[in-house]
Image (tube, helix red, strand yellow):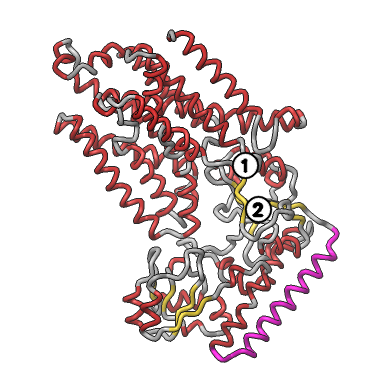
Amino acid sequence: MAFLEELGLANTIVAVDQTAFISSPALLRRIQEGLVASVKPGASLDVERVLSMQPDAVFYYEGAGGEDPSFSLLKKNGIKLIPVNNYKEQHPLGRAEWIRFVGRIFGIASQADSLFDAVARSYEDQKNMADQQPLRPTVFCNAPFSGVWDQPQGGNYMAMLIKDAGGVYLWAETSGSGTISLQPEAVLLKAQNADIWINCNDYTERRQLLSEDPRLSRFKAFSQGRVFAANAVKREGGANPFWELGVVRPDLVLHDLRQIFSAAGDTLSMYFYRKLR
Amino acid sequence: MKRKPIIALAWLCLCLVFGAALMQGSGGLLWQMEPALAKLLLLEYRLPAAVMAVLAGASLALSGLFMQNVFRNPLAGPFVLGISSGASLGIALVVLAGAGLPFAFSGAPIKALAAIGGALLMLMLNVVVYGRLKSTVALLIFGILAGHFVSAIVESLQYMASGADIRNFLLWGMGNLQVAGWVPHFMIGLVLLASWYTGQRVHGAMDVYQLGDDYARSLGLNLNGYRKSLMWLTALMAGCVTAWCGPLSFVGLVVPHLARMLLGTALHRYLITGTALLGALFMLTAHLISLLPLSNTELPVNVICSILGAPLVMLLLLRNKNLLLE
């Protein structure tokens, strides 16, 4: 959806999985006007609703479970099914480059190419600025839940973003592009003296983290107040532009991380991130 | 084999496994670390987890013993009243339906309160049903049906939740002994102590009750009050443990049988302490095994409980074909 909005095609969207997870202002307006419906309120697609809307195409992610069994019915009724698997890309720019694919489907390839080129240039500029920063802070991610603390693996796009923003990611040497589930003890051992802690996205204040687990105060990043969350803008239902616009504009995410990793960074001008109070 | 050496051996094993659980962890062996770090890991991570394993195991095993006694059913466990389902509903409402709510309505204390509230709600329903029907069989059926009903609500919430929220809920369901802070330990410990003490006070009544309602009534036992007391204690123990540690399976079902078999008695005077002790040993062993894989990740403790518990139940059934007829 973020690709379509970036290409100025938000008005072509007639339905989404769940409107509660939408953060785009243009799409929210259309939802309020009743022009966009929810067609996947649970785990399955509401095929009848989709058929009644007669869309030209359905964009979808190919999950590990294979194709949705309801898709054959859509195909029989002449609806085109177009997979957009940008989430499988390991590099942030690779994920954003899928805008070219979407642009070609709508016959606006050159516009899509120029948009992506601008994002790629901006990303490279941010990366070059990060390269010139003298500081190389150590970084770790996420927060524990029910005795498990996930960290992105070394090939994950988040690990790439941290590296390109001038940070030293503590689990960069791990192989794979998913996440690794760790015990809190293992994270403490490695990250106790790390400089920066990012992606505590369920929290807005440090005391909330402490109420979940008082031992988190043992982390240097916590005691020095260098804990950040990618939830500067978050809708009531939990929708967060970090997961939409952030995919199309990794240069903006990189900008935020570069600000965070730089000692003189201006954290007030960030797009997605904020410092936990 | 006499009871005292068995109890002494169980205590010795408990101490050894407890010590091993303190020494071993995903961070490595304690004596290979710097003293300051070793102290931090020991006092704030490994000790709370090991103590929680002892408390949770003892609580669930004791509540299993109580339920097997109340229902006179060897396959009854602490969750037969739908208590686990009630706690799951509380957690599901916070984690799945409460996604996007302000933190004040979704933090750890709220989750614990919701789980305990769900467990107590199910208990209240059980007490009301028992008050009307006066039948343990009806109560057993009601508990199972209520459990299914609540599970259907939880599944509906899962169906509509986001992937991240579903994952968080599944993680809770896999069990967790790494509970931070000492407040949960204190609360579970307090309920366990009260239950153990009550059990010691009524062990004679528990033995008499096993011989049938008529016989127990003829000896002056207030059946209604007796059953309600044990049900309340069971719900409190199982509800508190489930709230913080997730729905830990098999301990309540299998450990009372192990205690009967090892101690060679059906007298509750011995079974109450023996069951609590073996429950603590069972859960602590499961915790230690979950720490053993030589990586930073830990196998969910509930998986270990099932791997240890299911074969034990099968073995018990094979060894004692009359178990289901008791």
Parent chain of label 1: A
| Camera sees residue B71 | no
Q: Amino acid at mark 2?
A: Cys
Q: Position of residue A268 (x, y in %)?
A: 68, 63
Residue at 66% from the left image edge and 73% from the top image edge: A94
Q: Give the Cα distance between marks 2 and 1.
A: 12 Å
The answer to whether residue A129 is magenta is yes
Left or right, A247 with respect to B236, comes to right
Which residue corresponds to mark 1?
A184
Q: Nearer the viewer, residue B290 or A4?
A: B290
Residue at 21% over, 34% down: B139
Q: Which residues are magenta?
A: A106-134
- Within 10 Å of disc 2 (Cα), the crowding (few <14, some 14-19, many 20+) is many
Residue positioned 70% across, 28% down in the render: B39
Decide whether residue A68 is among the magenta residues. Answer: no
First in sequence: mark 2 or mark 1? Answer: 2
Reply above or below: B258 against B208. Answer: below
Binning the other alpha carbons within 10 Å of mark 1 as few (below 14), some (14 to 19) or many (20 upward) gives many
Q: Which residue is mark 2?
A: A141
Please identify the quadrant where the C terminus of chain B is shown: top left
Residue B224, given in percent of the width and then of the height, sits at: 19, 23
Where is the N terminus of chain B found, in terms of image quarters? top left
Query: In terms of depth relative to the viewer, which is nearer, A235 or B153?
Result: B153
Which element is circle 1 on? helix
Percent of width and height locating residue A201: 58, 56
Instruction: Report helix, strand or loop for mark 2.
Output: strand
Which secondary structure is most common in the magenta stretch? helix
